[in-house]
């Protein structure tokens, strides 16, 4: 916002010198009356009225301009932050607590960059104000310049107490975040049911209260400390100033100074006090702004280092041989323990592959590696023999589609909820309807008051809330928006559906997928705990403790009589 900033700078400077200038005007007025000099009286009145006019203009034009400039800058900073963070292709920055914490700090403090220009304006105003005040004091008597020198201790005391109070504030930030999260839990409609069933209301309140008390204790302690230090220095400075005033009055009585000088020194007292405090605040805030920018700089560097810049190859348009995992090992960022160990596996082009295994076996982790949310810690993922690490993440993801068990309930219109599965065709009615049909969500849409244009989610006045299964069908339809992905990842996206509905859906889907797979060699990877679905897959991969234990078709694995046969028999018996 260059123009508003330029005008603001001029106005801020004008406003900064107005108060001391008016003080000078008053002293001239008094002197003029004492000497019965109309010119001096006119000068005094002129300066006072001129000062009022400048303040008026600066207030009327200056504040709105400064607000506009500040909002524009803060908006720009926030947009830029979002751009930088969402541009990081991997998920590591969400996983590592040290990085997540720093990111949170950058986000929380983003507004400080937005006010950066304003802080500089303050600093500029303080300098202008200081020069004017010093000039006026010196004009009365150069000895009076010792006062601001003494004021240096006040700058120090104001600085250390603001550092201390900001440190207390910063130290209590983790508690503040926790309090915010606990408040969210206690008021969110989604958690309301369990909070009531388990009688957690009181527990939450007690925790919030305890955290708040601790938070306030730290801040009050810092404020008390600052009050004592800053208060004592201010008192000492006040006493010194009082001595100076007595000295100027005595000199005036001796005819060595004028009455105007006395008025000037008297009226300058609060301004000198303000000036010293202002300098301290400025030093602190300029430091804060610089720190915020350096954190931001760190984030940009981090984003650059983690942008997988060397991955520039285009993803293939079709798969010929398939995807191979070669001795893949993986530990989540910031952790030591291997979640996947020595996984070697070939997913042939055009096949439907099911991943099975107990909770925590590593199925979802494998799915995430295939979508390249992370790179393997060891080993490689090869797409038609090409290392996935060399393929541009955007290009690879444009060839993927996915549905997850913990899918996102986007509270948009039903059309958008499905359509964003392929943003390029979001407004293509036929494409959205086809995806709805593939996701077996036609009945859900038919039941909505305004069909695809119905706003979903209870937060909106006319929003419609859906059941878990209904939301899931729409999420599945979203996964089916891309008609011919090279890799479709379905990680228990039907867990909220009944087994029969899931079975029917996959049967339909498998028939359509075979036709598409013949053209593009696309692979479907399905994670499910239901063997009625799993058995339809061409290849079943049984995972156990982060390793691949068995691989084969349903029939082969039954004959082998291993873990799969055992688990299948258990589930089949339960249904008999
Ligand atoms: N973000 C994460 N950070 C650290 N460890 C994780 C993370 N996500 C999963 N894990 C660990 O990785 C292991 C495998 O988890 P994964 O989600 O891949 O299992 P899964 O086979 O999909 O299980 P389920 O059937 O319960 O969905 C688990 O032991 C889990 O604790």
Image (tube, rainbow, N blue to C red):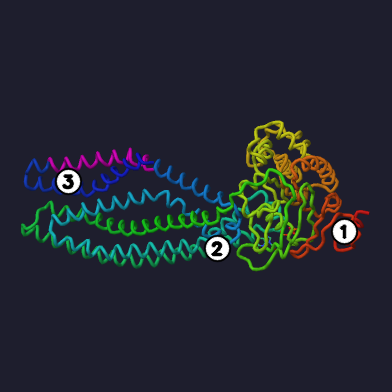
Q: Nearer the viewer, residue 37 or 43?
A: 43
Residue 429 marker = none
* Horizontal side, residue 527 vs residue 233: left or right: right
- The answer to whether residue 22 is above or below residue 447 is below
Tell me if I can see residue 474 in this picture: no
**Label 2: few (<14), some (14–19) or many (≥20) C-alpha neighbours in 10 Å:** few
Mark 3 or mark 1: whose residue is earlier in sequence = 3
Mark 1 or mark 2: whose residue is earlier in sequence = 2
Q: Which residues are magenta?
A: 42-66
Report which residue position mark 2 lands on.
Answer: 98
Report which residue position mark 1 lands on.
Answer: 557
Image quarter for residue 160?
bottom left
**Label 1: few (<14), some (14–19) or many (≥20) C-alpha neighbours in 10 Å:** many
Q: Are marks 1 and 2 in contact (CB under 8 Å)?
A: no
Q: Quadrant of the N terminus?
A: top left
Q: Nearer the viewer, residue 401 or 57?
A: 401
Q: Nearer the viewer, residue 263 or 378?
A: 378
């Amino acid at each position: 916002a260059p123009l508003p900033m330029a005008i603001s700078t001029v106005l801020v400077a004008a406003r900064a010198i107005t108060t001391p200038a008016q003080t000078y005007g008053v002293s001239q007025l008094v002197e003029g009356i004492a000497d019965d000099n109309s010119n001096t009286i006119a000068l005094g009145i002129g300066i006072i009225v001129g000062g009022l006019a400048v303040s008026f203009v600066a207030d009327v034009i200056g504040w709105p301009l400064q607000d506009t400039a500040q909002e524009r800058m803060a908006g720009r900073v926030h947009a830029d932050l979002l751009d930088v963070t969402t541009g990081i292709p991997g998920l590591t920055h969400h996983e590592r607590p040290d990085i997540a914490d720093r990111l949170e700090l950058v986000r929380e403090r983003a507004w400080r960059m937005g006010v950066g220009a304003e802080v500089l304006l303050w600093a500029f105003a303080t300098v202008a104000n200081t020069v004017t005040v010093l000039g006026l004091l010196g004009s009365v008597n150069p000895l009076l310049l010792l006062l601001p020198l003494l004021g240096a201790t006040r700058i120090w005391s104001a600085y250390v107490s603001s550092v201390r109070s900001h440190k207390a504030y910063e130290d209590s930030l983790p508690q503040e975040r926790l309090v915010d999260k606990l408040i969210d839990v206690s008021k969110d409609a989604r958690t309301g049911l369990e909070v009531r069933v388990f009688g957690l209301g009181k527990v939450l309140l007690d925790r919030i209260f305890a955290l708040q008390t601790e938070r306030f204790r730290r801040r009050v302690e810092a404020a008390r400390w600052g009050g004592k230090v800053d208060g004592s220095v201010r008192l000492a400075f006040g006493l010194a100033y009082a001595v100076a005033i007595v000295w100027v009055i005595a000199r005036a009585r001796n005819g060595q100074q004028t009455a105007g000088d006395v008025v000037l020194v008297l009226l300058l007292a609060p301004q000198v006090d303000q000036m010293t405090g202002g300098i301290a605040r400025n030093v602190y805030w300029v430091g804060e702004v610089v720190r915020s920018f350096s954190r931001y700089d760190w984030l940009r560097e981090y984003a650059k280092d983690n942008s997988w810049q060397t991955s520039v190859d285009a993803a293939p348009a079709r798969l010929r041989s398939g995807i191979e995992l070669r001795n893949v090992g993986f530990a989540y960022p910031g952790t030591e323990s291997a979640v996947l160990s020595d996984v070697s596996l070939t997913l042939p082009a055009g096949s439907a592959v099911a991943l099975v295994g107990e909770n925590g076996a590593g199925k979802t982790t494998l799915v995430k590696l295939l979508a390249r949310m992370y790179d393997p810690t060891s080993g490689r993922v090869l797409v038609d023999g090409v290392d996935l690490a060399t393929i541009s993440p955007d290009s690879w993801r444009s060839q993927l589609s996915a549905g997850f068990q913990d899918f996102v309930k986007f509270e948009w219109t039903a059309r958008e909820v499905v359509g964003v599965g392929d943003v390029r065709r979001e407004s293509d009615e036929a494409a959205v309807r086809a995806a709805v049909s593939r996701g077996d969500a036609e009945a859900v849409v038919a039941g909505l008051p305004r069909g695809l244009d119905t706003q979903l989610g209870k937060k909106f006045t006319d929003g419609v809330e859906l059941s878990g299964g209904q939301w899931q069908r729409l999420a599945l339809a979203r996964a089916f928006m891309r008609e011919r992905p090279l890799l479709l990842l379905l990680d228990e996206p039907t867990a909220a559906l009944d087994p029969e509905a899931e079975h029917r859906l996959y049967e339909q889907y498998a028939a359509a997928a075979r036709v598409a797979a013949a053209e593009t060699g696309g692979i479907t990877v399905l994670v499910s705990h239901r063997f009625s679905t799993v058995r339809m897959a061409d290849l079943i991969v049984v995972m156990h403790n982060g390793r691949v234990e068995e691989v084969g078709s349903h029939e082969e694995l039954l004959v082998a009589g291993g873990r799969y046969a055992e688990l299948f028999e258990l589930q089949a018996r339960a249904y008999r």
